[in-house]
Image (spheres, rainbow, N blue to C red):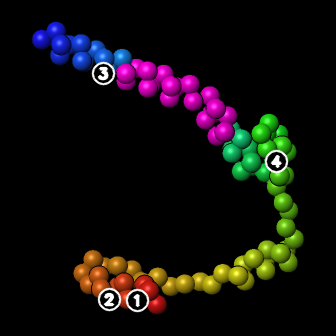
């Protein structure tokens, strides 16, 4: 009986140690998320490990039209839930 309780205690202590190591990683993860969100907004930021971030680019109307011409509209068949083989065949085309 005492051995089982010692094993449980050891297990719980190990879990607590693992949780503490994961909690120590949280501040760095929060900083990274903040940097990512700022970069998404197009703001210029400074990262100690990388240097200056890229300020959001501004594209002219010609560049935007050229970007759109790279993509084609594709009509995707809707799966009705009955014949999956024919739907896959049409989707591959």
Q: Is residue 1 left or right of residue 36?
A: left
The residue shown at (61%, 35%) is 29
SS label for mark 4:
loop
Foreground disc of the pair 3, 2: 3
Neighbourhood count class around disc 1 (C-alpha, 10 Å): few under 14, some 14–19, many 20 upward: few
Q: Position of residue 2 (x, y in %)?
A: 16, 9
Residue 58 appears in which quarter of the rendering?
A: bottom right
The answer to which of marks 3 and 1 sits earlier in the sequence is 3
Q: Which mark is residue 11?
A: 3
Position of residue 76 relative to residue 48, above or below, is below
Q: Which residue is mark 1?
A: 90
* Residue 18 falls within the magenta-colored stretch: yes
The single residue placed furthest to the top in the displayed view is 2
SS label for mark 3:
helix
User: How far is the residue under mark 3 from the one under mark 1?
Assistant: 54 Å
Residue stretch rendered in magenta on the structure: 14-33
Foreground disc of the pair 3, 1: 3
Foreground disc of the pair 2, 4: 4
């Amino acid at each position: 009986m005492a051995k089982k309780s010692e094993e449980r205690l050891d297990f719980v202590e190990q879990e607590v140690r693992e949780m503490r190591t994961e909690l120590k990683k949280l501040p760095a993860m929060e900083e990274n998320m903040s940097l990512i969100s700022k970069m998404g907004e197009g703001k210029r930021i400074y990262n100690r490990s990388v240097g200056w971030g890229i300020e959001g680019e501004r594209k002219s109307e010609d560049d935007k039209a050229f970007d759109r011409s790279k993509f084609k509209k594709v009509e995707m068949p809707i799966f009705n839930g009955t014949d999956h083989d024919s739907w896959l065949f049409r989707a591959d085309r």
